[in-house]
């Protein structure tokens, strides 16, 4: 069993608070992704799990056992670094065998000649050699066993780093953005390999990344972090369809969810110049709320028409991008306002995806039809999702 | 000669054929013109003296009449080899050099490791620890001679206070203690340089490899051997070479403190050389001693390069 | 990762180290400010007694220390200036040019690092005697420079390696001569390393002993290193006076070095540390 439990974990560096009050329950065998932008604390949290950073407050439990006071080597966790951190002066074989040799280390191994012989003996012993060979075969590293890291490609080094982690048969695999240093094509291939590895090995994986595509495709659950706090903890599907707040809504999805300012009027919502009837699901929430709201709509939940229709939002095409099977159209709404205030977004602009190659051009006037069936409501004041039950942490 | 992009050479060694380099238009003599002044200067003030020294070593020349020499061939060298106290000089030199290198580098390494982590006042500590290296050797010799003074030196006082020795140790006058005393003084002076160089080299050590080793269960010494040492080893070996050469050359400290005494306990090659030349006034013998010392220095350097090249080739091929 | 090595032990060791490193100099200062009575007392005086400041006035009056310091300064500055002037050209050549004999030049500069001064002083004595350079400060400067030029050439070469070629090529296109480029463009860009080189040259001249002792015999031209060494083992001058002289000789060097040491280290290790 390899369940992880974080209880009120916090970390500060002097006066700077890096992580504040995190509670997470990770089930055995889960593939947890820690997702977030640079500086959100995801790597710090991972390193605290590993024991590379101390815990300022709170507790970490592995299988019910408290581990946050233990040194890294005693936690039965393996760590894969972003830069792989292979031992440059050892062969691949010895890199992979190293943790096993260290496990049997005695103080007198430091004596120059004798220690070297003892270590080599361990390396050649049937158990160790067998495990190394098996790991190498799993990761297709067999021909590379006697090479040195500096002669290997990025992807090969990545696999050696995985091998060095695997060979310890740890309860938990911790990975700090291991795919970030690879080029795009390799990244996709390695993504699949890691997922396959997880299915094969069955341990608990904690994977840090800033790439939401990686998170959505690999994770069984995602913890989206920002400024040291968890914004939402749930399955990819939950996070996608029911984001806990506007930050999550805008982080996940390419292009991200649109947020349009609106006002509730009984059982209808007013967006800019139009008024729409709310679907039953949202109607109950709307009754309870008596504040301005933001309507969250995914880009593929809107359709465009050239005719001006009084029942639909009026807009003007500002940019069209053709992405093969789809087109992404940026529309400036003429009468409605949006809450897109991150870097790189243009206020008042929403993004819509259409199938096929769109004929629209910059400056065209269009009407936007909104499909509310999968829409989400957020409080304009707090940004939190308005609903009867929102899963932030389990 | 025009149009080709030129690359600045970063090699101290002879230029390899793979380097594409062509001077921007201009006379092909320009490099030689640039190099000429220093070459001439060094030839005049080091090359020619060296040659002169070699010639002197085959003669018998008195200091009082430096321009008149009797040619006597290899006799100086033969006499040196026959003299047992010359072999003692070589032994003292070897001992002095080895101990200096080992302790200065070890102490420098320890200091560098201690200073490698941030702490309050680290900048100040790093600056202060280099004071021994900044002080003039003659001044160091003077103060250490006073500290080691038999009757009034502070060292003897502390030893008395700590109950270590009864009576007054006469450090620099005692044949058994003089060399250790000189060694301590020398190591005190040179370890800061070693620590500065090693500290700079430590900056190139990858923190992540260190952490990986810790996670893999390596103890502290293993972490050092696996993560830090491979990176700093080239620097440390080069440093060892320099300290070796300097130890073979060192004169000021030893001369001012003991002049090679007592009874030759601290007489290294250069001390013996100087004594022969300016006290015994035999320039020919002194020159022969100098040649022997130079040969040793060259030998050490060649061994160093051979070992280094072999190690690099082994790593490069794999 | 935070080091597993206990912080307290680290600080304690560092404090011990710093004490060891600074005690002798401290002791030199204390001794220079100790009364004659306390010099030979059973329990030595551990703190400087500022009342004894007149020891310094004494030292200045009774010895030629000021003359010695002046001579040392002349030799130091001379060595500094001459070394840099001589080193700039070959440093540039080794950095920018490719020519037959380049390796030989490098090798030659390296070999000179191995020659002991104590060995070369013998033939230099003879040569200087013939050139009438004995007993001149200029002769000392010339002899010293031969030993500092190789190191200074090496660090300057490293610094010039770091100057982008494009800057020079642009100047070349503008019609600047090679020497002109060197002086007006390259030199200002490597000024930090030049400062390091100046410090190295200065210190070598200031600290130097063998040549100053052997090649110069006149009292009026004596340098401070030789003057100070003359007191070791001699019994007539009081220790606190000797130490006062030692302090006057040492402090300028140490204080100057502390001020510039960051730049010296940077200048010397630029390009030489292997990652």
Image (cartoon, rainbow, N blue to C red):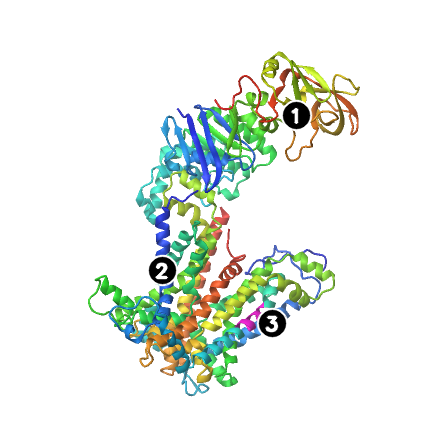
Task: Pick whichever, C230 or C124, lies toward us.
Answer: C230
What segment is highlighted magenta in the picture?
Answer: C79-87
Say the numbered circle drawn on residue A258.
1
Q: Is residue A1 left or right of residue A303?
A: left
Figure quadrant of the N terminus of chain B: bottom right
Residue B306 visible, this orientation:
yes
Disc 1 to disc 2, how far (Cα)?
66 Å
Nearer the observer: mark 3 or 1; the answer is: 1
Circle 2 packing at 10 Å, graded few (<14), some (14-19), many (20+), is: some
- Above or below residue C195? Residue A92 is above
- Above or below residue B50? Residue A244 is above
Disc 3 to disc 2, how far (Cα)?
48 Å
Say the numbered circle drawn on residue B36.
3
Residue at 65% of width from left, 25% of height from top? A259
Residue C210 location, x and y as percent?
43, 76
Task: Pick whichever, B90 or A281, lies toward us.
Answer: A281
Disc 3 to disc 1, how far (Cα)?
74 Å
């Amino acid at each position: 069993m390899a369940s992880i439990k974080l209880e009120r974990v916090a970390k500060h560096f002097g006066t700077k608070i890096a992580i504040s009050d995190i509670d997470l329950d990770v089930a055995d065998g889960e593939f947890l992704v820690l997702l977030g932008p640079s500086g959100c604390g995801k790597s710090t949290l991972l390193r605290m799990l590993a024991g590379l950073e101390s815990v300022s407050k709170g507790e970490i439990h592995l299988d019910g056992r408290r581990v946050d006071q233990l040194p890294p080597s005693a936690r039965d966790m393996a760590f894969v670094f972003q830069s792989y951190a292979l031992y440059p002066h050892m062969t691949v074989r010895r890199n992979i065998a190293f943790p096993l040799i260290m496990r049997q280390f005695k103080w007198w191994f430091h004596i120059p000649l004798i220690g070297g012989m003892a270590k080599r003996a361990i390396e050649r012993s049937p158990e160790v050699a067998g495990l190394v060979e098996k790991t190498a075969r799993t990761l297709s590293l067999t021909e590379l066993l006697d090479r040195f890291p500096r002669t290997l490609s990025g992807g090969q080094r990545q696999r050696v780093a995985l091998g060095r982690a695997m060979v310890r048969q740890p309860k938990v695999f911790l990975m700090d953005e291991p795919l970030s240093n690879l080029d795009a094509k390799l990244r996709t291939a390695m993504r699949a390999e890691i997922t396959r590895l997880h299915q094969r090995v069955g341990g608990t994986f904690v994977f840090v990344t800033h790439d939401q595509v990686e998170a959505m495709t690999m994770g069984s659950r995602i913890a989206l972090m920002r400024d040291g706090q968890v914004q939402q903890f749930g399955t990819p599907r939950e996070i996608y369809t029911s984001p806990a707040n506007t930050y999550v809504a805008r982080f996940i999805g390419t292009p991200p969810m649109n947020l349009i300012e609106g006002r509730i009027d009984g059982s209808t919502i007013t967006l800019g110049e139009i008024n729409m009837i709310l679907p039953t699901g949202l109607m109950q929430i709307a009754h309870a709320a008596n504040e301005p709201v933001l309507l969250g709509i995914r880009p593929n939940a809107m359709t465009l028409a050239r005719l001006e229709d009084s029942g639909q939002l009026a807009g003007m095409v500002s940019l069209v991008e053709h992405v093969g099977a789809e087109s992404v159209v940026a529309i400036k709404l003429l009468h409605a306002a949006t809450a897109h205030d991150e870097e790189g977004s243009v206020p008042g602009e929403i993004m819509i995806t259409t199938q096929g190659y769109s004929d629209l051009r910059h400056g065209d006037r269009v009407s936007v039809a909104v499909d509310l069936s999968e829409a989400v409501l957020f409080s304009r004041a707090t940004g939190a999702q308005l609903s009867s039950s929102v899963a932030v942490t389990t | 000669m025009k149009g080709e992009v030129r690359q600045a050479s970063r090699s101290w060694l002879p230029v390899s054929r793979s380097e594409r380099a062509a001077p921007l238009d201009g006379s092909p003599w320009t490099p030689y013109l640039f190099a000429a002044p220093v070459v001439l200067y060094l030839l005049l003030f080091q090359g020619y003296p060296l040659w002169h020294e070699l010639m002197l070593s085959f003669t018998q020349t008195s200091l009082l009449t430096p321009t008149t020499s009797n040619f006597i061939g290899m006799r100086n060298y033969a006499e040196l080899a026959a003299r047992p106290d010359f072999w003692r000089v070589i032994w003292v030199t070897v001992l002095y050099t080895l101990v200096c290198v080992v302790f200065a580098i070890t102490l420098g390494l320890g200091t560098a490791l201690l200073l490698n982590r941030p702490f309050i006042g680290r900048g100040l500590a790093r600056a202060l620890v280099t004071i021994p290296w900044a002080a003039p050797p003659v001044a160091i010799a003077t103060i250490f001679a006073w500290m080691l003074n038999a009757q009034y030196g502070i060292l003897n006082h502390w030893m008395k206070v700590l109950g270590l020795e009864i009576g007054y140790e006469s450090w620099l006058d005692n044949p058994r203690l003089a060399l250790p005393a000189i060694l301590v003084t020398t190591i005190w002076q040179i370890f800061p340089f070693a620590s500065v160089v090693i500290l700079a080299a430590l900056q190139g050590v990858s923190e992540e490899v260190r952490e990986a080793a810790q996670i893999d269960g390596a103890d502290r010494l293993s972490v050092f051997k696996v993560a830090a040492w491979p990176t700093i080893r080239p620097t440390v070996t080069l440093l060892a070479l320099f300290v070796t050469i300097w130890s073979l050359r060192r004169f000021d400290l030893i001369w001012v403190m003991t002049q090679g005494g007592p009874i030759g306990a601290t007489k290294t090659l250069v001390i013996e050389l100087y004594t022969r030349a300016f006290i015994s006034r035999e320039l020919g013998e002194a020159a022969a001693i100098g040649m022997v010392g130079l040969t040793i220095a060259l030998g050490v350097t060649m061994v160093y390069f051979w070992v280094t090249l072999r190690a690099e080739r082994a790593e490069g091929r794999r | 990762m935070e080091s597993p090595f206990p912080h307290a032990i680290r600080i304690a060791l560092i404090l011990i180290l710093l004490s060891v490193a600074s005690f002798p100099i401290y002791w030199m200062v204390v001794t220079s400010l100790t009364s004659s009575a306390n010099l030979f007392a059973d329990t030595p005086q551990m703190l400087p007694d500022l009342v004894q400041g007149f020891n310094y006035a004494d030292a200045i009056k009774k010895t030629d220390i000021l003359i010695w310091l002046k001579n040392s300064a002349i030799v130091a500055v001379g060595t500094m200036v001459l070394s840099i002037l001589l080193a700039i050209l070959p440093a540039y050549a080794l950095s920018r040019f490719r020519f037959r004999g380049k390796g030989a030049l490098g090798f030659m500069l390296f070999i000179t690092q191995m020659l002991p001064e104590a060995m070369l002083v013998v033939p230099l004595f003879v040569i200087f005697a013939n050139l009438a350079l004995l007993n001149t400060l200029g002769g000392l400067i010339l002899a010293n420079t031969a030993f500092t030029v190789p190191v200074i050439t090496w660090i300057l070469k490293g610094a010039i390696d770091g100057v982008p070629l494009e800057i020079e090529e642009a100047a070349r296109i503008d019609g600047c001569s090679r020497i002109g480029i060197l002086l007006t463009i390259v030199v200002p860009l490597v000024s930090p390393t030049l400062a390091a080189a100046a410090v190295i040259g200065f210190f070598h001249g200031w600290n130097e002993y063998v040549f100053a002792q052997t090649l110069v015999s006149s009292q009026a031209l004596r340098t401070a290193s030789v003057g100070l060494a003359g007191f070791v083992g001699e019994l007539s001058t009081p220790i606190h006076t000797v130490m006062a002289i030692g302090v006057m000789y040492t402090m300028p060097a140490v204080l100057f070095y502390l001020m510039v040491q960051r730049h010296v280290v940077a200048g010397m290790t630029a390009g030489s540390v292997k990652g």
